[in-house]
Amino acid sequence: MGILDNFEKGLERAVNGAFAKTFRSGLQPVELTSALRRELDTMAAIVTRDRILAPNRFTLRMSSSDYERMRSIGPTLIDELVQFVQQHAAAQHYQLAGGISIDLVEDPSMTVGLLQVASENIKGDVTWTPVLDVGGKRYPIVKANTIIGRGHDADITVDDTGVSRKHVQIVWDGTRAQVQDLGSTNGSQLNGSPVQKAILEPDSVITIGRTRIVFRVLPQASSVDQAAEQRVEDTGPRPIDGFWSQS
């Protein structure tokens, strides 16, 4: 349990510390991890002597005020929650029927500070989806070449005077990603060091001008991936919220 305790403390420092003033009342982000752990342990079912099946799809229902506070953190919160579920399931030797999905749902009838958790087992394949977090917005990588810059002809446009019209290119071959500076005026950095061309590892940080770009590879249930990909195919690259949902 030491790893899990450290993870919860790390999440509490990283998230609650930055939003301490905002969260003086209502739900704390670390309460979501506690609720997910309880749900996993409560709903885990012994199928055979060597197989304990735990839920992989979760709905966290909360008040409108708490929903807006949690959503203001952005997709990083969902990433951390998914990682927490993975870690706890592995530590307890639980098996999952498919990819993990977590929905935060707004319920105006609920009291601030209260949380309702529902879960279910959804059978499906786990797929790994590459995304770029750019200035707090998330963009799925759906093309072989994605250009980021200040110009309107870039695939992802950033409002930053320190960025060239076509500043960097992200190359994705279906397995791995690569960043390439496109001869920009102010150059690019990868994890704090100047870069012209390099392979991107998950959670690599690219800096152009004042803009921070994080490359991530996220585990998702196939149904979620297909829905996201369909939206992108219809309109081209644009930010997606990940697993947020509102009813």
Image: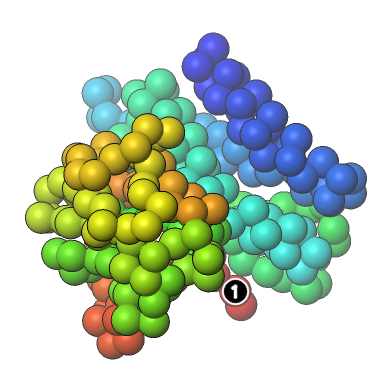
Q: Is residue 126 visible?
A: no
Outermost residue, bottom side: 234
Q: Is residue 112 above or below residue 151?
A: above
Q: Quadrant of residue 7?
A: top right
Measured as percent of width and height from the top left, residue 75 is found at 52, 55
Across the whole image, how many numbered discs are drawn on residues? 1
- Residue at x 75% of width, y 35% of height: 17
**Up/down of 229 relative to 10, above or below:** below
| The one of 93 and 150 positioned closer to us in this rendering | 150
Mark 1: which secondary structure? Answer: loop
The residue that disc 1 covers is 246
Tell me: 71 left or right of 174: right
Q: Percent from the top left, x then y, of residue 59?
A: 55, 58
Q: Residue at x 61, y 77 (%)?
A: 247
Side of 230 relative to 24 (left or right): left
Q: Is residue 150 left or right of residue 33?
A: left
161 sits to left or right of 116: left
Q: Is residue 139 above or below residue 73?
A: below
Residue 70: give x, y in percent of width and height: 68, 55
Q: Please state which of residues 95 and 173 is positioned toward the viewer in this rendering.
A: 173
What is the three-letter code of the residue carrying label 1? Gln
Question: Is any atom of residue 15 visible in this view?
Answer: yes
Determine the residue positioned at 12% across, 48% down: 175
114 or 15, which is in the foreground?
15
Q: Position of residue 94 (x, y in %)?
A: 36, 30
Mark 1 neighbour class, 10 Å CA radius: few under 14, some 14 to 19, many 20 or more: few
